[in-house]
Structure formats: structure tokens, C-alpha cells
Image: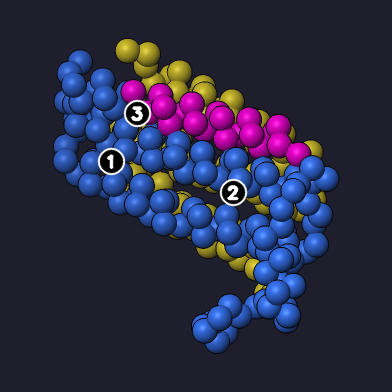
Chain colours: A yellow, B blue
Amino acid sequence: MIGINVYLILIAIATLLSTYRVFRGPTAVDRLVAVDIMTTITTGLMVLFALYYRRMIFLDVALVYALLAFGGVIAFARYMEGGL
Amino acid sequence: MNAFTVLGELLVLLGTFFYFLSTLGLIRMPDVYNRMQTSTKSATLGSLGVIAGVGIWALGTDFGSAAWLTKTMAIALFLLMTNPISAHALIRAAYKRGIPLWHGSVVDKYAEYLEKSGGDGETPEGGGEE
């Protein structure tokens, strides 16, 4: 099969493309959308790292990271809306 | 190399491909609504592929156990529930800030709803006593 390094490189390319949108984006919500996608991709990356390093404890790190990223994005969205 | 590793690698490959497609849509699309539309859906599908694929792949290795599959399913279910909520909150914030639609957009259902309901449209029919 292909191997786990190819998947890590594909995820790195995807993160670089969304970083381009973070720096380029015309409005603040554009940058926030790109950051939201980056957090989703980073959750998958942490799950892949758990398999790469053969440690099951990294899955808990991914779960907590997904929880915190969700709360942060919701808080930023409320702030952009003007309701915070 | 058994059936679990083959199926897991295929799912992880599909997931990372959808990650790449979602960020490609983030680059290519013209305004913030289209970018949200293309990127969020395919990133959710890519996350499901990667996370469930890792869970199945770990069953076929020598260090894997059923706890890997359980934990990855918990993470996948959590992402499946929370990712559309954050996307909806973000795009609602974008609309409330008054970011204009792309000039080639043909329909704006939320503006039609606001015009029909009269007020600011904060509360739909029969609910939302916030």
C-alpha cells in the first residue's frame, strides 16, 4: 500500500492552501472560515499521528482539540455577529 | 497486510483527498458563502474518512485493539455533530455583517424570508424565545 507518509504530505498541502486563504482573505469572516477548516484538518492529523506513533493517548488529545476548536469558532462567530 | 489495513488505508486516502478538495474550493470560489459551502461539507466528509479509516486500520496492526475503533468513532460522531453548527454560525455572522453576495448569485432565500416576515427575522414561526 501507499504508506502513511503520503497522507501526511497531502494533509500538509491542504493546510498550506488554507493558510493562503488566511493571509489573502478580503474580509475577516473569510479568514475565520479558513481557520475553521484548518482546525478540522488538524483533528484528522492528530488521529493520524496517533497511528504513526502507535500511542492511543493521542486520540484523547484529538478529541479535546475538536471540543476546544468548536467552542472557539462559535465564540468568534458570535463576536463577528456583534452579540458577544 | 490483511483486510483491515487495506480497507483502512483506502478510507484514509479518500479522506485526505477530500481534505485537498475542500481547501482547493477554499482557494477557487469567489465569495465567502461559496467558500463555506464547498469547504465545510467536503472537510466533514474527509474527517469521517480519515478518522474511521484510522480506527479500522489500527485493528489490523499488531498494537491495535477494539478501543481504537471505539475512540475514533466517538471523535467522528462529535465532528459530524459540531461541524455543521459552527459553519452555520459563521455564515450567519457573515450575513449579519452585510458582506455582499457574489455578482453572479441568482437566489437569496434569507433576504426573501426577511422581507416576507416583516421584522428582523430573528424568531421563526412558533419558537425561539431567546
Element carrying mark 3: helix
Q: Is residue B109 above or below residue B22?
A: below
Instruction: Return the residue at label 2.
Output: A36
Instruction: Return the residue at label 3.
Output: B11
> Could you tell which of marks 1 and 2 lies nearer the N-terminus?
2
Numbered circle sitting on residue B118: none
Instruction: Give x and y (percent) for residue B82.
Output: 46, 57
Element carrying mark 1: loop
Badge 1 vs badge 3, beta-carbon distance below 8 Å: no
Residue at image coords 65%, 57%: B91
Instruction: Return the residue at label 1.
Output: A56
Q: Is residue B65 above or below residue B36?
A: above
What chain is tagged by disc 2?
A
Residue B20 falls inside the magenta stretch: yes
What chain is tagged by disc 1?
A
Q: Estimate the spatial distance between the alpha carbons at disc 1 and disc 3, rounded to whole Å.
A: 19 Å
Residue situated in front as seen by the camera: A51 or A33: A33
Residue at image coords 67%, 60%: B109
Residue at image coords 61%, 80%: B123
Instruction: Give x and y (percent) for residue B128.
Output: 54, 82
Q: Estimate the spatial distance between the alpha carbons at disc 1 and disc 2, rounded to whole Å.
A: 25 Å
Q: Which image quadrant for residue B64?
A: top left
Instruction: Give x and y (percent) for residue A34.
Output: 65, 44
Badge 3 vs badge 2, beta-carbon distance below 8 Å: no
- Bounds of the magenta span? B10-30
Q: Is residue B127 above or below residue B69?
A: below
Residue B61, visible in the rendered structure? no
1 and 3 marks on the same chain: no
Q: Estimate the spatial distance between the alpha carbons at disc 3 and disc 2, rounded to whole Å.
A: 23 Å
